[in-house]
Amino acid sequence: MRLHQLGSSDLFISEIGLGCMSLGTEEHKAIGIIHEALDQGVNFLDTADLYDNGRNEELVGKAIQGRRDRVILASKAGNRRIEGREGWVWDPSKAYIKSAIKDSLHRLQTDYLDLYQLHGGTIEDPIDETIEAFEELKQEGLIRYYGISSIRPNVIREYAKRSSMVSVLNQFSILDRRPEEEVLPLLHEKGIGVIARGPLASGALAAEREITKGYLNYSPEEIIKLRTQLSAVARESNRTMTELAIRYSLSHPAVATVIPGASSREQLLANIAAARTPHLTQEEIEAIKQISEANRYEQHR
């Protein structure tokens, strides 16, 4: 498994990580998937306090016992549960972030996080206060580095300008190429690493996955048409659709890792197989972009 430096940090993370959100809550199965990932060379695990109301962090914490030194561990905060109320509220305040880290560390059974991320954000947030919270957590040794998880270019621009974050977790795939327009060039210029989530577009680009629902502005029929065209590119280079999709998300120089989810060992191994395939050639990248552009043009006719 190739390792890539995450932004300006000294974290070297596997180019394919594990997005832990889709592990489920069955302990034996979830821990088995994490152990298999680590055995296959994955060293980057991404979770959040929001996932399964903290249960996901608990399962990750159990899975990494005795293996903590092999793991680059990331979690997120900013979504706050209020006793007696349904759901979560957004709270990027310094007080809450510095409180939330303690609960996450307890659930993860560790005394530090390698990467702590703001789980969202708006331009109306008290951004300087939020940054101050992360900086203090670094000084206190509770986190090594921090970043944000956001798809909002205006928010990303502000944090890139005002903070020492090392990463942005951003949705990026063949079916969602919006980051290519502004976000990825900006972060590449600033030396901030991108953690690409959704490289398989919620399964729409996964090998052998039946298409039963749309994705973003794509209907199931449009996804099937696009997949048929992409499959020809994949076959020419002896790749599966999953491998082609993951390699595309990794092809931008700003991207340090992709974090496809896996709810089974089979899905995990299909994702990790992309690590054993060569980088996309420039010809493959151009062919994928042409197919994508042609389909986007058809959508707007």
Image: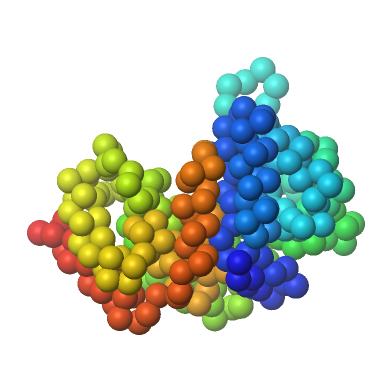
Residue 130 x, y percent position in the rendering: 70, 54
Residue 6 seen in the figure: no
Q: Residue at x 67, y 17 (%)?
A: 84
Residue 96 x, y percent position in the rendering: 75, 41
Compared to residue 79, the image places residue 243 above or below, namely below
* Residue sticking out furthest to the left: 301
Q: Residue at x 72, y 68 (%)?
A: 11
In the image, 281 versus 79, the foreground residue is: 281
Horizontally, residue 146 falls left or right of residue 216, namely: right
For the N terminus, give its image quadrant.
bottom right
Residue 135 x, y percent position in the rendering: 79, 61
Compared to residue 52, the image places residue 239 above or below, namely below
* Residue sticking out furthest to the top: 84
Quadrant of the image occupied by residue 127: bottom right
Residue 39 x, y percent position in the rendering: 67, 53
Horizontally, residue 269 falls left or right of residue 133, namely: left
Compared to residue 256, the image places residue 24 above or below, namely above
In the image, 10 versus 33, the foreground residue is: 33
Q: Residue at x 63, y 47 (%)?
A: 36
Q: Residue at x 52, y 38 (%)?
A: 263
For the C terminus, give its image quadrant.
bottom left
Residue 205 seen in the figure: yes
